[in-house]
Image (cartoon, helix red, strand yellow):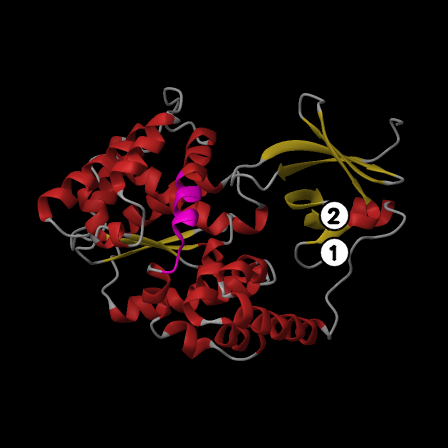
Amino acid sequence: MTLSEPQRPGRFSDGRSAASRKVVVRVLPSGLEIRGEDGFLIAVWKTDDLLADGEWPEKRGIRLRCASEPDARLAVEDAFVIRETLPKPPLRRKSRHTGLVLACLLGAAVLVGLMVGLAPVSKLLAHLVPAGLERQWGQSIATGLEGQMKPCEGRDGLRVLDALAQRLAEPLPADRRGVRVHVLKSKDVNALALPGGEIILFSGLISKAEGPDELAGVLAHELTHIGERHVSAAMIRALGVGLFATMITGDASGLVASGLGAALAGAYTREDESAADMGALDLLEAAGIGSDGLALFFRRLATMEERQGQMLAWLGTHPDSASRAAAVEARRLPAPRLPALSDADWQAVKKVCSKKSP
């Protein structure tokens, strides 16, 4: 290694959690060397194994995968130096045949899905969806839900929620950090992650939360669904591979907006939900927020379930709350370094659905 070898800052995720870490990426003749900020060698990715996780940009913001580590992701801020230095650039702009390739892959997946079921192929297919298309879907679903339910429009509260979500999303891959929070009036104690970074909070959840750390825990859970592409995988299971293929290759705006949000609410697997709980702890820790709020939220949901003798909306699509609380408590985070929200910001959130809210 020589000092002349280009190096650039980046973020690396090993794929085992939603969190990522800051790294230094060196461009070598044989590929990319990835080291932590402490100089510890994390990985060496060979040029021939590099894959694009999205389009090749002109100058900045490239996200890479490696064939030898399929779950890992590397985001590098300066794509130009990588493109110009690597002897064999690992990716190019998508060609006009991309849609045809996707259609062929999805056609094969339909056959596999018919033979072995949707679950084994849903996560694979989710990684074929371009980030831009996911954002279009999420915006379309959010618009459809806001047309069916009354949105809360308190500007101060929505601003606070967006800022908190962005803070929690910081460790996620670059194309998963563009988060927007919507609040809909409903007594349901529930939240919903949509493709591309849209998050729906129901006002019933905000009213039941006793503090901002509880709400931060729920947001971190939903953000993990987004970061791990659980949402697109859930869409495949909710719609079936055939309809999902239509959404990939054709105009599916009406299909997305009509009832898909409700279908998504029950389409996660228990494994997805458990993984999202653990991923939420990673995001909370990175943001300096404690885990006690999330555990307390689950404990109170479990008590509500016992008292009401029925499943709340949140509980109907998630593992039982007592078990979730125990799992969070078993991995209790260090004392929080920073509050999730100030008192003034928390009051703005609590009033987000108030007619008098600014």
Taking the spot 36% from the left edge, 26% from the top edge, the residue there is 330
Left or right of 41 in this view: 109: left
Magenta span covers which residues?
267-277
Label 2 crowd (10 A; few <14 / some 14-19 / many >=20): some
Observer able to see residue 339? no
Left or right of 99 in this view: 339: left
Location of residue 250 (image quadrant) = bottom right
Taking the spot 62% from the left edge, 32% from the top edge, the residue there is 22
Does residue 269 belong to the magenta stretch? yes
Disc sitting over residue 233 in the figure: none
Observer able to see residue 99? yes
Q: Position of residue 53 (x, y in %)?
A: 66, 54
- Cα distance in 3D space between marks 1 and 2: 7 Å
Left or right of 137 in this view: 107: right
Kindly report the secondary structure that dominates the magenta region of the rendered protein.
helix
Taking the spot 86% from the left edge, 45% from the top edge, the residue there is 85
Q: Position of residue 44 (x, y in %)?
A: 77, 36
Are the residues at dot 1 and dot 2 in contact (C-beta closer than 8 Å)? yes
Residue type at mark 2: give it.
Ala
Residue that mark 2 sits on:
79
Q: In this view of the protein, which residue sits in the foreground, 233 or 256? A: 233
Taking the spot 45% from the left edge, 39% from the top edge, the residue there is 279
Label 1 sits on a secondary structure element that is loop
Earlier residue among tags 1 and 2: 1
Residue that mark 1 sits on:
58
Q: Position of residue 1 (x, y in %)?
A: 88, 27
Label 1 crowd (10 A; few <14 / some 14-19 / many >=20): few
Q: In this view of the protein, which residue sits in the foreground, 21 or 42? A: 42
